[in-house]
Image (spheres, rainbow, N blue to C red):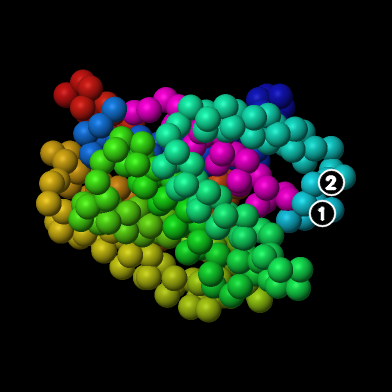
Amino acid sequence: MKTLKALFDFYLDASIHVALSVLAMAGVTFHLFDTFSDLDLLGFIFFSVIVCYNFIKYGVEAYKYLIVSNAYHKTIQLFSFASFGGALYFLVQLDAQIWWGTLILGYLSALYAVPLLPRAKNLRNLAGLKIYIVAFVWAGFTVLLPLLDAGLPLNWDFWITFIQRFLLVLVLILPFEIRDLQWDDKSLRTLPQVLGIKSTQRLGVVLTVLFFSLTFLKDDIHPLEIGLRLLLALVLITVLLANKKMQTRYFVSFWVEAIPIFWFLLFWGIERYV
């Protein structure tokens, strides 16, 4: 049991779970726009998310963003280097337009942890900006890159889907912000620090309703989209209001991050078997 728990903790700490979550959202995009999944793009997204998240989580605390002293973190660092090799392998299989999209999103991810100028702050330390950068990058990886890869136009439905994905990620981040309220530096000015927990929860509910309502502005609505977005919205609201469970060890880090995975599995399962 100790070995299984250690493996599970590594699965979470090394960002494999969050990479699968991002991958699932990209998979939903392929379903929504009725196009084939590109294994090269999915492989690139999976490994690059591992690299980016581990760098953000552990690199900012390392000496010159590279040298870590903790043995456990060194293992995660080696795993991240291997994932970087995997991301490069899949990236070279993709078209040049994906490279440009990746360059922009990667630049934002780097600024999140590394300041542009020696005396400047990184984006992570700019008050209140953190979650918007993360949400924008996730939306880019899971909506923009799949459509560029499929050669589809960036039309009205793309922008609605992009905004919806941005809102979805914002809502998914809020439980983490609430959970970490007691540990976050006050200078970060996270939403729970500024608004309080209850107001943050209410904001999350409003964003969730907006996320669902925007579906009706699309020109082409997938047959499963309304029902599954409604189910997703109800799950998100339930999670936002689950005050006591947010403080348990795995509720946010595993179950909340697994929501996009279940969302994708429902899309895939219903289309395949119903």
- From the image, tell me which residue sits under label 1: 64
Q: Residues within 10 Å of mark 2 (few under 14, many from 20)?
A: some
Marks 1 and 2, how far apart at CA: 7 Å
Image coordinates of residue 152 in percent, x first then y, are: 26, 41
Q: Can you say which quadrant of the picture contains the N terminus?
A: top right
Image coordinates of residue 40 in percent, x first then y, are: 45, 27
53 left or right of 28? right
Q: Residue at x 55, y 41 (%)?
A: 49
Image disc number at residue 67: 2
Q: Residue at x 82, y 54 (%)?
A: 64
Amino acid under disc 2:
Ile
Instruction: Say if the magenta span includes residue 106.
Output: no
Above or below, 238 relative to 26: below
Above or below, 125 relative to 153: below
Q: Main secondary structure of the magenta part?
A: helix
Instruction: Say if the magenta span includes residue 39.
Output: yes
9 left or right of 269? right
- The residue segment tinted magenta is 37-59
